[in-house]
Image (cartoon, grey):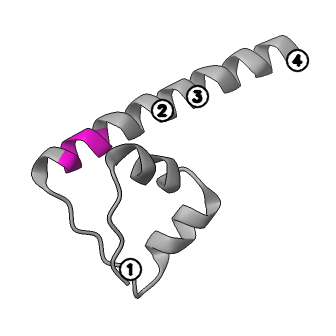
Amino acid sequence: MRLVVDTNILVAELLRKRGIALINSPNFELSLAEKMKNEVQYELQKRVSIFSYQLSVISYQLF
């Protein structure tokens, strides 16, 4: 299967349960241009940092 997506779609899928299952599939191959690879790394780090911050705020508010 060949799938063409932009950076935002790829990052969103990598953060979802189904996306994680997809990339763990032995049939999955990922080919990225260098520019897109850098964009994906940047966006993943940014979104994970945001999630982490939001979780810390929520846990602070609960306790």
Q: Earlier in the sequence, mark 2 or mark 4?
A: 2
Q: Position of residue 39 (x, y in %)?
A: 25, 40
* Residue at mark 1 to residue at mark 4: CA–CA distance: 40 Å
Specify whether 23 is left or right of 29.
right
**Does 4 sit above or below residue 39?**
below
For the residue marked with disc 2, what is the amino acid? Arg
Residue receiving disc 3: 52
Image position, residue 16 (x, y; %): 59, 54
Displayed quadrant of residue 38:
top left
Q: Amino acid at mark 4?
A: Leu
SS at badge 4: helix
Q: Is residue 2 magenta?
A: no
What label does residue 62 carry, if any?
A: 4
C-alpha distance separating marks 1 and 3: 28 Å
* SS type, badge 1: loop
> Which circle's residue, 2 or 3, is located before the other in the chain?
2
Q: Residues within 10 Å of mark 1 (few under 14, many from 20)?
A: few
Which residue carries the number 2 mark? 47
Of the numbered discs 4 and 3, the one sitting upstream in the chain is 3
**Of the residues shown, which amino acid type is indicated by label 1?**
Phe
Highlighted magenta segment, given as a residue range? 36-41
Q: Quadrant of residue 57?
A: top right
Q: Marks 2 and 3: CB-CB under 8 Å? A: no
Question: Looking at the image, which is closer to me, 28 or 60?
Answer: 28
